Image: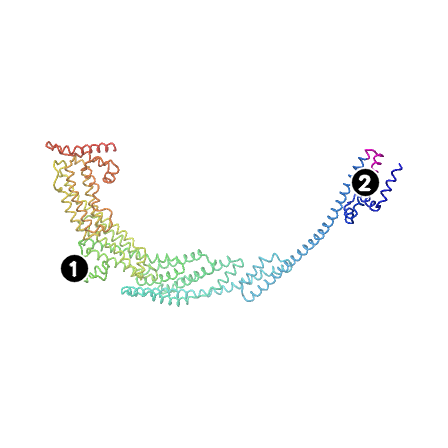
Amino acid sequence: MTAQPKKRAIIESGDGGLGLGLAAFISNGEDLGPIIRHAFETGKPEALMQNLRSIVKKKEVEIEELCRLHYEDFILAVDELRGVLVDADELKSMLTGENIHLQEVSSASLLKLDELFELYSVKKNIGEAITTLKICVKVISLCMACNGYIAEAKFHPALKTVDMIEKGYLKNIPLKLLKKVVAKHIPLIKMHIEKKVTSEFNDWLVHIRRMAKQIGQVSISQASLARQKDEEMRVQQREAEAHSDARPDEHMYTLDVENTDEESTLNFDITPVYRAHHMHIRLGIGEKFRDYYYKNRLMQLNLDMQISTSQPFLESHQPLLAQVAGFFIVEQRVLRSADGLLSESQVETTWEAAIAKITSILEDQFARMSTASHLLLVKDYVTLLGTTVSKYGYQITQLIQVIEKNRDKYHQLLLIECRKQIDDILANDSYEQMIIKKEYEYNMNVTAFHFEPDDVTPEFPYVASFSSGVPDICRLVRSFIEDSISYLAYNGRMKFYEVVKGYLDKLLIEVVNNSLLNMIYARSLAMSQMMQLAGNIAVLEQACDMFLLFSAHMCGIPKRIAQRSHSGLTARAVLKASQNAAYNALINLANFKIDEFMVLLDDVNWIAEEAPDNSNDYMNEVLIYLETLVSTAQEILPLEALYKVVSGAMSHISDSIMTTLLNDGVKRFTVNAVMGLDIDLKLLEAFADEKFHNIGLSDLGKETTFADCLVEIRQLVNLLLSSQPENFMNPVIRGRNYGSLDYKKLAIVCEKYKDFADGLFGSLSNRNKQNARIRSMDVLKRRLKDFS
């Protein structure tokens, strides 16, 4: 017990201050790092180590004493308590720091949030104030502008401003007093504008009725002057083109200048109508004004169309029609320019009612007239009325119908007269080529119709390709054109070229062509006459262009323009078809004549025992006829027609021989008969090739020659004379040498075919030579039977 106090005294006798500090730090659980660092920095680590060792020993002594006092449980409790104390200290320090940090951050955010709420409130108040001020300023400025427009009688912008205020701002005015004042004055302004424009329109109605007659007279006078100018121009143009010195541009320029000067007198003011209509539309009562306008104008028209009973119609028709023309000229101007004021149906209804009454008046007056000049005088002015109003889009069908009743009748009478004359011409025609001996006859019958170039003068006597009936028909057609234009020219500015062309087509198709067809189907003409008729039709078909150019020339259409037109006469195609009918008739006549010679096939010895040295009689007759046919056709017909006729004749000859072999009249035939046919065909083929090349048909690029028309009978003869007829069943050989033969026809012919005649004195050597061909023919017969 006495030893322990001594030891503690020794320890404390060292560096007592340092030892006490260390002990305090250790007791508090503080960091010893600064003390240790300071000891090493001052160079006294030994003292530190000594003090630490003293503290350790002291603590060990204390521990030993405590352990002895509380034993092991106390030791454990102390250890646990020290651990809990350390954790509690750490948790306390952590919570303290987090609390301080949270308070610092949240206090700054709350200050900023309060500031933001305050700024939003200020912004909202300022925006509402600005919006209110803008609306009020805009409304007031529009009201001031509207007052200025009304003071200057500018109703359109004034009404536009009122609509803008009413539709865009009135409901949104925030100041009730201002809103009430504006709403009260809007109807008053609209009523004021309506009264002003209606008053102006009523004044215009009175003025325009007085002007309507003058407008109509001026417009009809322009139409009359233009028609006269056109007639003069047509005469000058025809004369100029006849001398190849036309100057259409200069004439057209003069006409345009005159029209421009005359159109200036047609100016009339309809501004009050535009103004009133537009203002009523903007006021929302456009339908009311449209009805008001229509009823007032209809009343004026009914008053204008009353016929004077104290004045003859010949004297009153011009003022009446001029008033009507002026009325509808004004209406058309209003329809085009015052959008929506008048509908097309209203104008058409008014025009239909007016034109119905005019038509009724004209029909009644025409029925009363007994003098042609009176009818033409009224008709002329009615035509001018139609020409005038048609420029403004009005339908004048009823007027034209009244006038054209006589026109159709007139042309029908012309057609009847022409039909009689053409029938006489065709009946009296000799159908021989026309021989012209003198130049004036040539000019009258050839040059006048441009059958030959104008600069070519032939040697006389001149043999024409047509007969005397062709120039007579051409003169008759030209006379018909002139008569038709003389009547249609009364229609002034009407473009009657198409009408003339229609009547010309009718003449050529219904009269000329039908008369020609009657001659073709009558079968009263000989072969040469039928050829000449076919040649005449070809000339007339070519003359259609001349007729068309003559019509255009008489209608004042320049030749160069008419030639550029792609629409020709339908009659040309019809006459072309009639040419084909004539060619078919020629083919039928030729075939009929050939049939007379082909009858001689019945005299051929089909079972001849010897091969013939010469052609059969029928072929000689056929060749003589074909020579005559080709020589005659070559002088009259064009090459294309000649080709058709001769090709048809060749094909008919081939068909006739084949038909003869197929018919029951030939029970059987021998190789010698076939050899005779071969001789006939060679003569005919030589003739065909010679004529085809000599005539010049090879230059036309025809793929089928005259000899090709005999291909079927030629292939049959070649097959019957071949050493191996069975080769026909070989597709390659058949396609190359026998492609035109028909299986059924060949089977019939082969059944009749005998390789030699049934004679008692036939040469044994010849028969041996024929055995192979006979066997081959038998094989062909069997295979043809199997095929069929």
Q: Which residue is mark 1?
A: 461
Q: Quadrant of residue 322?
A: bottom left
Task: Name the amino acid type tagged 2.
Answer: Val
Residue 51 vs 309, above or below: the answer is: above
Magenta: main secondary structure? helix
Residue 367 in the figure: left or right of residue 192: left
- The residue segment tinted magenta is 60-74
Q: Secondary structure at mark 1?
A: loop
Between discs 1 and 2, the one toward the N terminus: 2
- Residue 73 within the segment the image draws in magenta: yes
Residue 296 vs 788, above or below: the answer is: below
Question: Where's the N terminus, which quadrant?
Answer: top right
Q: Which residue is mark 2?
A: 56
- Bin the neighbour count of mark 1 within 10 Å (Cα to Cα): few under 14, some 14-19, many 20 and up: few
Residue 623 shows up from this direction? yes
- Front position in the image: 649 or 570: 649
